[in-house]
Image: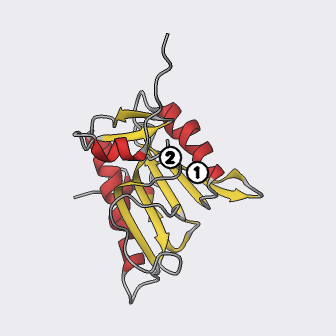
Amino acid sequence: MEARRRQTVSDLIAHPDERVELIDGEIVRRPMARGEHGMAQGNTREVLGPLQHRDGPGGWWIATEISVAYEPHQCPSHDLAGWRKDRMPQRPRGVVELAPDWVCEIVSPGHERKDTLTLLLLLQRHRVPFYWLIWPEDRSLIAYALEDGRYHIIATLSGATQACIPPFDDISLDLGYILGKDAV
């Protein structure tokens, strides 16, 4: 039996389908987009938007659906990722090779293991300071911070809660709005 070749970032870039990512050396399709996922992703991006403005509490680049090459066989496409402008002075372009300062995944049914274990361990290994998981179906958010090389839960929110969560302490997040409850 022949061993299966682990695919690389080059294989991912050459792949004809854009709704794929590279996880553990395998090119996999991203989950089908659902209304709850799109609402949470779009509303989170909107709420964090002022952080990018020069006249706001800024200093961040916040991007959606962005591929980050962490290792030759690891290039996930994050639902949301952010870089402090002092670490990345120019906006992210193409496949980014600099680990973000913050990642947020919107957990999709059937893909929980990837978000809660595979990506958590990858981001921890690459010292991404903050990792958030939004669970649209459960109407909740779990925020992790890296301390002494390991992630620790710093916030668990549910329902229509409002809170300031690192690394975005300068703004109050309305979880009800993020999850679509109060969206017009």
110 or 136: nearer the viewer: 110
153 or 79: nearer the viewer: 79
Q: Residue at x 37, y 58 (%)?
A: 95
Residue lying farthest to the bottom in this orientation? 55
Mark 2, secondary structure of its residue: loop
Q: Is residue 23 left or right of residue 177?
A: right
Residue lying farthest to the front in this orientation? 2
Numbered badge on residue 112: none
Q: Earlier in the sequence, mark 1 or mark 2?
A: 2
Q: Position of residue 175 (x, y in %)?
A: 44, 56
- The residues bearing labels 1 and 2 have C-alpha atoms spaced at a distance of 15 Å
| Dot 2 amino acid type | Pro
The residue at which mark 2 appears reads as 72
Vertical comparison of 69 with 48: above or below: above
Vertical comparison of 37 with 7: above or below: below
Q: Is residue 15 left or right of residue 57?
A: left
Residue lying farthest to the right in this orientation? 148
Q: Residue at x 22, y 40 (%)?
A: 16
The residue at which mark 1 appears reads as 123
